[in-house]
Image (tube, rainbow, N blue to C red):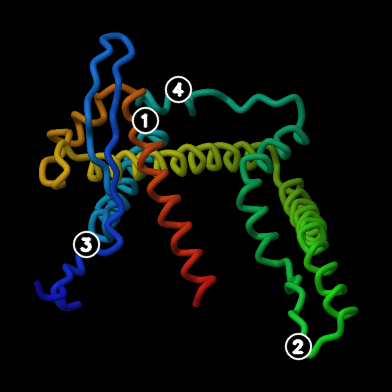
């Protein structure tokens, strides 16, 4: 028997993370088996395009008087006791963006590793600096967040209530559309990654509509199983980075 030459290895099978998943119906006690695998770049592209189309459609409906989405989320006057409450509401809806802005502004380099001929005292100080770094970074980040929020608060306070109401509704729409992008992306990802057979040839769902109309519990379970595969791949990537 000859040894397998490296050129005989199917490169498409490398890093093909997959798993067998058993799904049990608690009412009927029936058990179904499906097979999940991480999707590739082409399918990720499909999922991204699908999620942005869904988000754009939701945004259109939220801006269109008479749609169910408009009636549910937008067809109410923003009613706050005073202008300060309205400013606070707009800030709250924008807090993630403000925090990210602050994070980019924090400049606190990690402690520099001592040279190979460092003294014990220098190594001790380095370890102390490493141990204290997370706390120091957290304090620096919070200081920057407070600064950014203060600046944004002053900017918003210069606006009248009508303009603030518009900003509030814009942020409501952006929040809902961001949630829709994330939800739709993983719905398509799970649909594309779930198969009936261990050869990964026959998908478990005939089409996307069938998947969307399936049980919420089933979709939640498949999503959790898929994300566990993602976590495994992330762990592998980090491990490879450490060894390089």
Residue at 76% across / 46% down in the picture? Answer: 157
Earlier-in-chain disc, 3 versus 1: 3
Q: Position of residue 195 (x, y in %)?
A: 18, 40
Earlier-in-chain disc, 4 versus 1: 4
Residue 101 got which mark?
none
Say if 186 sits above or below 78 in the image: below
Tell which tag, 1 or 2, sits nearer the viewer.
2
**Front residue of 152 and 137:** 137
**Front residue of 144 and 188:** 188
Residue to which mark 4 is pinned:
72
For marks 4 and 1, give the CA distance. Answer: 28 Å
**Front residue of 177 and 14:** 14
For marks 3 and 2, give the CA distance. Answer: 42 Å
Tell which tag, 2 or 4, sits nearer the viewer.
2
Crowding at mark 4 (Cα within 10 Å: few <14, some 14-19, many 20+): few
Judged from the image, the secondary structure of the residue bearing numbered disc 4 is: helix
Judged from the image, the secondary structure of the residue bearing numbered disc 1 is: helix
Residue to which mark 2 is pinned:
115
Say if 70 sits above or below 199 in the image: above
Residue to which mark 1 is pinned:
221
Earlier-in-chain disc, 4 versus 3: 3
Tell which tag, 4 or 1, sits nearer the viewer.
1
For marks 3 and 1, give the CA distance. Answer: 26 Å
Q: Going by the picture, which residue comes out furthest to the right? A: 121
Q: Position of residue 72 (x, y in %)?
A: 45, 22
């Amino acid at each position: 028997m000859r040894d397998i030459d490296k050129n005989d290895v199917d490169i498409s099978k490398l890093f093909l993370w997959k798993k067998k998943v058993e799904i049990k119906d608690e009412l009927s006690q029936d058990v179904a088996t499906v097979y999940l695998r991480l999707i590739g770049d082409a399918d990720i592209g499909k999922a991204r395009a699908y999620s942005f189309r869904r988000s754009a459609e939701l945004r259109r409906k939220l801006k269109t008087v008479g749609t169910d989405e408009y009636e549910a989320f937008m067809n109410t006057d923003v009613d706050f006791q005073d202008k300060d409450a309205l400013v606070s509401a707009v800030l709250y809806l924008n807090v993630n963006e403000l925090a990210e802005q602050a994070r980019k502004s924090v400049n606190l380099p990690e402690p520099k590793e001592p040279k190979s001929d460092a003294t014990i005292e220098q190594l001790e100080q380095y370890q102390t600096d490493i141990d204290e770094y997370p706390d120091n970074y957290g304090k620096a980040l919070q200081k920057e967040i407070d600064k950014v929020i203060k600046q944004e608060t002053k900017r918003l306070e210069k606006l009248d209530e009508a303009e603030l109401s518009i900003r509030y509704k814009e942020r409501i729409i952006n929040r809902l559309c961001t949630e829709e992008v994330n939800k739709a992306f993983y719905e398509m990802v799970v649909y594309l990654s779930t198969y009936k057979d261990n050869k990964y040839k026959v998908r478990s769902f005939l089409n996307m509509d069938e998947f969307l109309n399936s049980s919420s519990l089933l979709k939640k379970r498949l999503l959790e199983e898929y994300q566990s595969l993602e976590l495994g791949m992330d762990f592998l990537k980090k491990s490879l980075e450490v060894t390089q």
